[in-house]
Image (spheres, helix red, strand yellow):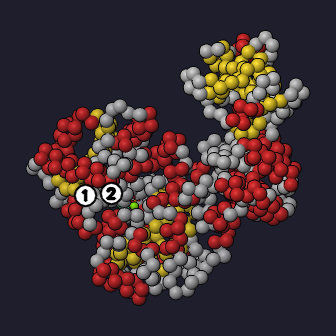
Amino acid sequence: MNKTNTGKLERLGIHTDMELVLHLPSRYEDETKLTSLAEAMFRRIGHIQTEGVITLSEIQYRPRRQLVVFLSDGANQLVLRFLHFYASQQKQLALGKRVRARGELRQGFNGMEMVHPVYKIVDENTPLPDALTPVYPTSEGVSQNFLRKAINEALERIDLSDTLPDALLNKLDLPGFEKSIRYLHNPPANADENALLDRTHPAWERMKFDELLAQQLSMRRAQIARRRQKSNVLKAPGSLTKAFIRSLPFTLTDEQEKVVAEIREDLVKAWPMQRLLQGDVGSGKTVVAAIAACQAIDNGFQVAMMAPTEILAEQHFQRLNEWMAPLGISVVWLNGSMKKKAKEEVLSLIGSGEAQFIVGTHALIQESVRFANLGLAIIDEQHRFGVGQRLVLRNKGGNAESIIPHQLMMSATPIPRTLAMTFYADLDVSVIAKLPPGRKPVVTRLIDQKRRDEVIERIHAATLGGRQVYWVCPLIEESEALQLQTAVETHAILTEALNELSVGLIHGRMKAAEKQAVMTDFLEKRIHVLVATTVIEVGVDVPNASLMIIEHAERFGLSQLHQLRGRVGRGSIDSVCLLMYQKPLGDTAKKRLMTMRETNDGFVISQRDLEIRGPGEFLGARQSGQAMLRFADLEKDVDLIGKAASLAEDLLNGKLPDSDTIMSKHLARWLDYREEYLNV
Ligand code: ADP
Ligand code: MG
């Protein structure tokens, strides 16, 4: 790249010539046409470019200091008004000069005028440009002119030859790369501006396709590279696995059997499993993870399970301990708020290998945690963790540095198809598509906040029938303290209104031990109604709870509502979810609440969520803010994603002549420092 330009360009995140030419316009200005002053006077409104000779140029002081310039063609007159200007501009706009001005026409005090037009001094023979003028995304201090010049220079010195052969492009019905990129930077005067703006123009399609292809190739290469890494072979089935499955109080569903088999096959391989287990809230992922854990323990390895919250981690611990301790397995648990002494004991059990199954929060990835021989890392609610955090756990393999534990990630937030095909293309995915039998769908009702009394009546009815109730307090984004206060107040109000019942309270500020005591009381039915903040959002499992009340449901996101609702309907009893809302409702809130009322299906909900919010939220920390796809749109470009994925597949399988050359050329063009990130 040209040395003198680097500083400014780096401000835009541009480091190479290729990045520079891939800095594509966000829109265009049409300077190819000239509207005569006569026609401008006739039109009176609109964005136009016109020309005239200066007949007056002076600073006026009313209503405030400003530069006023009169343009004329002899018969018609246009006023140019500059409220901010430099002395140099005033000098430049001298009497008798010919000016080409572009801007919005409006009716002013002295007839038609333009405020702050873009202009240049011309003479009668200055030609009009024959291409639309690109307008680039930029930041302060980097002018359009500078960018245009830098990009046009780069276009001349860089290799723009195609990465894909003509025959292939014909088949894909895509234009050439060089033609496309030149077109986008300098579209002809007659270009379809709308197609350029909404990026449906073939030239745009080509850019998007190339970008997607590079991403697919990179993801798949990462997947292949994974196979060259080493993991311990975990043979199956062992006696522990069999005993565990026999000891369960239920039989596995076909869906669970299927994913158990998929995982079992991965674990016997000598390279690391990297599998995402998807299943709706309540579909029974934990037991699947436990079976995988048995396979590792059977082979003499340790297993770690990491969960995003203390409540969830502790609950996993309790359940797993209940299941596995009778089989002679040592299950331990680790969290951040443990007392020093207790923690040290657990750490030493982990380090010595005595602890076989280690359940915990983020505490598991701290420096001080040393595993003796970690064979399998399980991450629950994986979307709550960043790539970095998952990597740390993966790198805690124990003795042999180069051996990587198998990794099982779990999520109840289904990934929409387009995301699965792009950002998650490097993972193997298992899906539990159905809930265990006997579950009844939760009935969801929307209730105006004003009808709180009726809600309290319902609580009476539910508890009389021996059921338990969750009451979730409103999310207050801006203040955790305020959220806490609301929870405490609600608890007091409900305690009074339901004086014959036991009302509990749980929130994020409580100590882990306090939270656990409350959850145990709730599980053992000493608490009838549990007032909670969103700490109960993920994973909590109390099958006897059958009524879920969410206050100010309009403030919650869809997946959050779905997760919360998933806390009920876990047993075989009829469950109800009451979403209390306060009017007026915004459009988005309305859509979310309707979706909740309509369906219990996590996949449908996540698809709607994608439509309502866009993909950003789903990706979470996966790309930590780095927009890996700049051009392609996950919703609009489904077809292109499909085409790119299948071409990537063909290339990697060597199905095309010169597959390798094509791939390396394409990746060299499109991937630079990004690839590193893609490979984690
Ligand atoms: P999630 O997939 O949301 O993590 P859990 O693993 O917490 O779901 O399972 C929800 C409940 O379903 C638990 O109480 C679990 O013991 C129970 N469960 C799991 N599998 C089955 C099954 N095959 N039959 C009956 N109940 C099951
Ligand atoms: Mg779970």
Quadrant field for ligand 2? bottom left
Q: Would you place residue 558 above or below residue 583 in this image?
A: below
Which mark identifies residue 130? none
C-alpha span from label 1 to label 2: 8 Å
Figure quadrant of residue 244: bottom left
Of the 4 image quadrants, the one containing the N terminus is bottom right
Q: Which mark is residue 535?
A: 2
Q: Of residues 59 and 399, which is closer to you in this image?
A: 59
Q: State the image coordinates of residue 195 (x, y, percent, origin top left).
A: 72, 34
Q: Amino acid at mark 1?
A: Ile
Q: Nearer the viewer, residue 21 or 585?
A: 21
Badges 1 and 2: C-beta atoms under 8 Å apart? yes
Secondary structure beneath dot 1 equals strand
Q: Amino acid at mark 2?
A: Val
Residue 14 versus residue 239: which sits nearer the camera?
A: 14
Residue 428 sits above or below residue 152 on the image: below
Question: Looking at the image, can residue 174 be seen?
Answer: no
The residue depicted at 74 percent of the width and 47 percent of the height is 147
Residue 219 falls left or right of residue 553: right
Name the residue: 38% across, 45% down.
556
| Residue drawn at 34 percent across, 83 percent down | 344
The answer to whether any part of residue 141 appears in the image is yes
* Disc with the residue nearer the chain's start (1 vs 2): 1
Q: For this rendering, which residue is in front, 520 or 325?
A: 520
Task: Reply above or below: 425 against 577.
Answer: below
Residue 143 figure quarter:
top right
- The residue pinned by badge 1 equals 506
